[in-house]
Image (cartoon, rainbow, N blue to C red):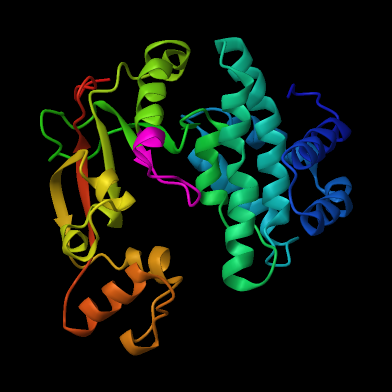
Amino acid sequence: MSNTDHPLDATQRALWMAHTLALPAPVREALEALCPRLPWHDLAPHIRALCDARKAPDAQKTLAGILASGEDNSGFAQLAAHLAAAGLTRQRYREAGVDDTIFWETMRCFPRFLSETHASTGRWAFDRAFWTWRQTSCCLFRLGTLEFEYRTADETQIPGVQAGSAVLSVHIPSDARFTEEALAASYAQMRRFFSREGSAFCTQGTPAAVVCSTWLLAPALLPLLPEGSGIRRFASSYILYAVDEDDPGFYHWLFGGSSPVDELPGRTSLQRAVKAYLAQGGKVGSACGVLRLPGIPQAV
């Protein structure tokens, strides 16, 4: 987007992204009504900043402030701004020689997030603007079943990694598959990507490690998982370096929210196992681990 970018260009870009990503019809209809009314000239520099990893976090907060007064708690004004930014991000991918498939797989976070929120609340809303600047600024990429975020490590306990070094953080989308084939393919694609075209986005140098912080690595889960479990398969590739037994995040991802133990859902075998474990006074929490796989050393 240039400094003289016409509002219609940003509107077209946002709506084109919404259509191409096949956002749910109610969301597309709301965007079609909303986009022509947005103050695109005022938003333009902040939308450009969403495509710059150095500026994107602050740009997201600024956009949220500018657009807050005109929103109805749907978050669709921020969604429009992030979609307009994503249209610009595609050009950055092309300039780096990144396959268009990776762009679209990465940007499918938008329909996924919308569907997740609808499933948990019953309404269409966009509540992930705090997160999607990572996709628009070329920090986070969907490579197969997993996502990988290039970032600077602020931790001091990652084995063999100094604070301030670049690392890759593994994120697990809600539609990730934990088959042996899917995981192996994703890690292989990660290594190829960041050693080739993705290296253009490694502004702080080659990642020193591949790390993951999630409830899925919590040691307390292992006794509750059957042999052959996908979660067990995923976790087996990580050597833990930190455990937080009191992290409540698993309630959201496993149960859809926090409730008294006897009110937690028990629709799946894992929900039932964890519910029984909690009822006995157990703790789940989360853990951090560093990836160790044959053929994929700590450094990418």
In-image side of 204 versus 217 (left or right): right
Q: Which residue is drawn at 41% across and 46% down?
A: 172
Q: Can residue 50 be seen in this view?
A: no
Q: Does the magenta stretch include residue 172?
A: yes
Please tell me whether residue 127 is drawn above or below residue 143 in the rendered image.
Answer: below
The picture quadrant where one finds residue 252 is: bottom left
**Residue ranking furthest to the bottom:** 262
Q: Residue at x 72, y 34 (%)?
A: 44
- Report the front residue among 281 and 223: 223
Return the x and y of residue 22 as percentages of the image width and height.
75, 44
Return the x and y of residue 68 as percentages of the image width and height.
67, 59
Which quarter shows the C terminus?
top left
In-image side of 275 versus 32 (left or right): left
What range of the chain is rendered magenta? 170-183
In-image side of 223 versus 229 (left or right): left
In-image side of 84 versus 220 (left or right): right
Return the x and y of residue 291 as percentages of the image width and height.
22, 34
Which quarter shows the N terminus?
top right
Q: How many labels does the image show?
A: 0
Q: Is residue 282 magenta?
A: no
Q: Residue at x 51, y 27 (%)?
A: 138
Please tell me whether residue 282 is drawn above or below residue 99 in the rendered image.
Answer: below
Q: Can residue 54 be seen in this view?
A: yes
The picture quadrant where one finds residue 285 is: bottom left
Return the x and y of residue 73 as percentages of the image width and height.
68, 67
Q: Residue at x 88, y 46 (%)?
A: 36
- Report the front residue among 210 and 222: 222
**Residue ranking furthest to the front:** 227
- Report the front residue among 171 and 225: 225
